[in-house]
Image (cartoon, grey):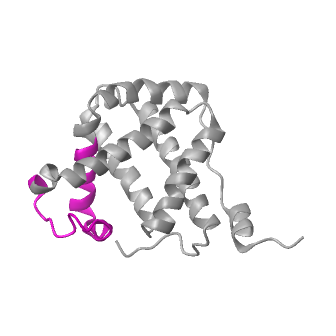
Amino acid sequence: MEKFQGEVEMERRERVDQLTEAERVMIQHTWSKVYRQREDVGVSVLVRFFVNFPSAKQYFSQFVHMEDPEEMERSVQLRKHAGRVMNAINSVVENISNPDKVSSILGLVGKAHALKYKVEPMYFKILSGVLLEVLGEDYSDCFTPDVQRAWTKLMGLVYWHVTAAYIEEGWVKLSSSAV
């Protein structure tokens, strides 16, 4: 039986390590604190993302021309998207012990961004890094090195599942250095 290009590519991709029970507990514990402030955290993450990686704004016609971080913070569209990002992360964290559900959630996110929005998948990796930075700064009291490692591992899983959806949808190039 002949394999499709995407299937061959998926086999070659290095699967990231699954989370241990202790890592899942750490993630859920820290997320419970973060999620109480989800609107502010989400806005902080997106504003930093767009300020540091302005090329990402090309996918958002409503604020593509905004340069001022304070103007971005006030943008209704940015705030709405920040809410969607935080709710997606929340869905992953809530279902962290159910790999099939997590795969399904992230598959839908990946397909929408690949097909509908045509977002380069590298931006998921970049956004993950920005999220980790913000969490480490804003929640330094509970973001210990072990917690940081657990969240880094989770973000690796998120990227793996999202890019799997891109591959399924026929995307050939999964990364770019043109940021």
Q: Residues in magenta? A: 42-70
Q: Residue at x 54, y 60 (%)?
A: 111
Q: Residue at x 22, y 68 (%)?
A: 64
Look at the magenta stretch and give its main secondary structure.
helix
| Residue 150 visible to the viewer | no
Q: Is residue 90 above or below residue 167?
A: above
Quarter-of-image position of residue 98: top right
Q: Nearer the viewer, residue 165 or 144?
A: 165
Q: Is residue 101 magenta?
A: no
Give left or right: position of 168 versus 113: right
- On the image, the x and y values in percent for residue 62 come to 22, 64
Q: Residue at x 25, y 60 (%)?
A: 50
Q: Nearer the viewer, residue 80 or 73?
A: 80
Give left or right: position of 28 versus 6: left
Give left or right: position of 153 versus 16: left
Give left or right: position of 60 versus 155: left
- On the image, the x and y values in percent for residue 3 come to 81, 71
- Looking at the rendering, in which quadrant would you find the C terminus? bottom left
- On the image, the x and y values in percent for residue 47 come to 22, 53
| Residue 131 visible to the viewer | yes
